[in-house]
Amino acid sequence: MEKVIALINKATFEIQKLVDLKYAKVSGLTKPDSPLNQVNLLGGDKIVRDYLDHGEIGLALDHLNYMVEETGIQLPPDLRATLAEISGRIS
């Protein structure tokens, strides 16, 4: 499981960076009901870390996928492969 946790931590850092970049580009332009106006996205890395701290690896992965889907960020191929590897190791 240590390998999976390390992969999740790496993916979390990269995904949060992409979410933050997307938010920075549209900040001030987002409507109140925009998918980006969610605390679970802007601080998503903290939520993932909390899940990991409580041994909830599947929920941590679910939250990463949620962050990607809600924001519509485009993941580079290596990061998509990392998420697929995590998924394969925990299913």
Image: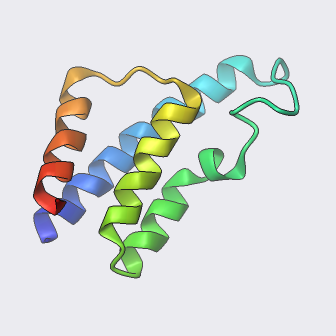
Specify the quadrant that holds the N terminus: bottom left
Q: Is residue 4 above or below residue 54?
A: above
- Residue situated in front as seen by the camera: 50 or 14: 50
Query: Could you tell me which residue is drawn at 46 percent across and 53 percent down?
Result: 63
The percent position of residue 14, horizontal first and vertical second, equals 37, 39
Residue found at the very far bottom of the displayed protein: 54
* Residue 49 as seen in the image, left or right of residue 71: left
Q: Check the image and tell me how it is coloured.
A: rainbow
Residue found at the very far front of the displayed protein: 91
- Residue situated in front as seen by the camera: 84 or 76: 84
Q: Is residue 84 above or below residue 8?
A: above
The percent position of residue 73, horizontal first and vertical second, equals 48, 24
Q: Is residue 29 above or below residue 10?
A: above
Image quadrant assignment for residue 80: top left
Specify the quadrant that holds the C terminus: bottom left
The percent position of residue 55, horizontal first and vertical second, equals 33, 79
The percent position of residue 39, horizontal first and vertical second, equals 70, 51
Query: Could you tell me which residue is drawn at 13 percent across and 50 percent down?
Result: 88
Looking at the rendered structure, the number of numbered marks drawn on it comes to 0
Query: Could you tell me which residue is drawn at 41 percent across and 53 percent down?
Result: 62
Image quadrant assignment for residue 38: top right
